[in-house]
Image (cartoon, rainbow, N blue to C red):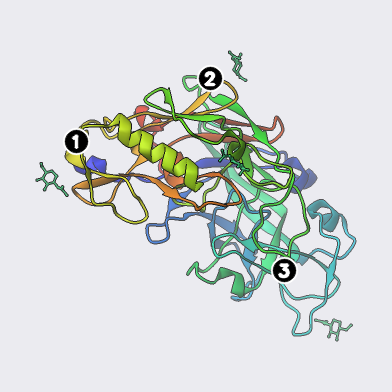
Amino acid sequence: MTSSFHFSLLFFSLLSLSPALAKASFHPHALLLPVQKDPSTLLYVTQLNLGTPLASEKLTLDLGGQFLWVDCEKGYSSTTYRPARCGSAKCSLAGADTCLECFSTSRPGCSNNTCELFPENTVISAATNGDLGSDVVSIQSTNGFNLGGIVYVPHFLFVCAPKFLLKAIHRTGVVFFGPGPYHFLLNTDASTPLIYTPLLLNPTSTVAVAGYSKPTTSSNYFIGVTSIQINQITVPNINASLLSIDHEGNGGTKISTVTPYTVLQTSIYTAVTKFFQNQLSGIPTVAATTPFKLCYNVTNFLGTRVEYNVLLIDLVLQNATVTWPIFGANSMVQVSDEVTCLGFVDGGLNPRTSIVIGGHQIEDNLLEFDLSASRLGFTSSLLFRETFQWHGP
Ligand SMILES: *[C@@H]1O[C@H](CO)[C@@H](O)[C@H](O)[C@H]1NC(C)=O
Ligand SMILES: *[C@@H]1O[C@H](CO)[C@@H](O)[C@H](O)[C@H]1NC(C)=O
Ligand SMILES: *[C@@H]1O[C@H](CO)[C@@H](O)[C@H](O)[C@H]1NC(C)=O
Ligand SMILES: *[C@@H]1O[C@H](CO)[C@@H](O)[C@H](O)[C@H]1NC(C)=O
């Protein structure tokens, strides 16, 4: 195989600030944040310029996170940082209705009469409380096609969190982007019509840490997968009730940027891998490589990187004509020079969410989280489109 076979960089997104957060100080442009994959953790990272003087913060992107948070214990110092005072408009905007006091030296992240939020590190399933504050942020703008000027957001709200939340991430600064204040915009161009599916509301939060979060509507993005097809044939024996979200918030399908590979509830995983193998009958499997269970010799799949000459997997959405096609580049993971595996993992018998669509399956796809219309727009792999070549500023 050629080197073009290897993972090329990213899926990336245009991030747009909501008018509410940006307040009256500027009208929302589309704002652009390049997103890259960290090869050691398989997490997606981005960079934001924050504070006065502006300092670059490296951030982890978590579409399911509830709000942005920054490590303020590592010496966050900025002349424009302002704690959000209890009862202020900033606190109500962020839904923060409880107060914190500070019993050490006052600094960003520790001040009296400041409202608190409960950021979660979804990577390690840890949560804690942290001060709500605001500061200046500068972000590259775009009109959706070209880069525009730098936009300054003077009162950007975020949570000043303790260092402990960063445990296991091994980075200097981490922020999770949540849906509340943002929506993702896509580099839509006329030649790429997006396919739309409704974003579903999960009635209960999927935040993993009990006791820290008030029960709320989940901040994760759920979509309605109704069946799965391989080779355009419906995979049999998928329990349909696992695909819908029940009244306790269990089941359904969400999109996660902190999950490297799509995770399927055990019975769905078994149905999919069996059917995939069945459709490739005649092609021998090779020894599996953890965390995958179905692996093949790459020589069986000579072809272009995109097509990978492998079976097409379709996530069928609201009706049979609306599907999310997953081509070889997004379905298979090449684990060595000779071996490629079906890039889905077994999520166990009782996961909270039955299907968690992970990073590998959304790379090189354009996703538009259109919160105002409550829908997800997507294209299948951009690897089909030679013109898509922007690689960050
Ligand atoms: C916050 O208030 C408490 C008691 O009201 C006081 O002991 C503490 O010094 C104050 N903290 C700061 C940083 O001013
Ligand atoms: C399908 O899933 C539901 C929800 O987990 C479960 O209660 C039911 O027993 C399952 N049905 C079958 C046939 O496995
Ligand atoms: C893959 O196939 C090639 C060519 O047939 C062979 O040389 C190689 O040993 C195989 N590798 C594995 C891991 O089966
Ligand atoms: C399928 O859904 C799409 C988008 O919601 C809609 O435009 C289309 O008419 C539907 N097709 C059928 C056959 O129901």
Mark nearer the N terminus (3 vs 1): 3
Distance in Å between CA atoms under marks 2 and 1 = 30 Å
Question: Seen from this angle, which residue lies furthest right?
Answer: 87
Label 3 C-beta lies within 8 Å of the nearest ligand 1 atom: no
Q: Residue at x 51, y 20 (%)?
A: 190
What residue is disc 1 on?
300
Whole-percent x and y of residue 65? 63, 53
Distance in Å between CA atoms under marks 3 and 2 = 45 Å
Whole-percent x and y of residue 345? 42, 49
Q: Residue at x 66, y 52 (%)?
A: 206
Callout 2 environment at 10 Å: few (<14), some (14 to 19), or many (20+)? few
Label 1 C-beta lies within 8 Å of the nearest ligand 3 atom: no
Placement of 369 over or under 109, stated as above or below = above
Q: Is residue 178 visible?
A: yes
What residue is disc 3 on?
130
**Which label was assigned to residue 320?**
2
Residue type indicated by callout 1:
Asn
Closest to the camera, between mark 3 and mark 1, is 1
Distance in Å between CA atoms under marks 3 and 1 = 52 Å
Q: Nearer the viewer, residue 315 or 183?
A: 315
Mark nearer the N terminus (2 vs 1): 1
Whole-percent x and y of residue 328? 33, 35
Q: Residue at x 64, y 59 (%)?
A: 208
Asked if the residue under mark 2 is in contact with the one under mark 3, i.e. CB atoms within 8 Å, the reply is: no
Residue type indicated by callout 3:
Gly
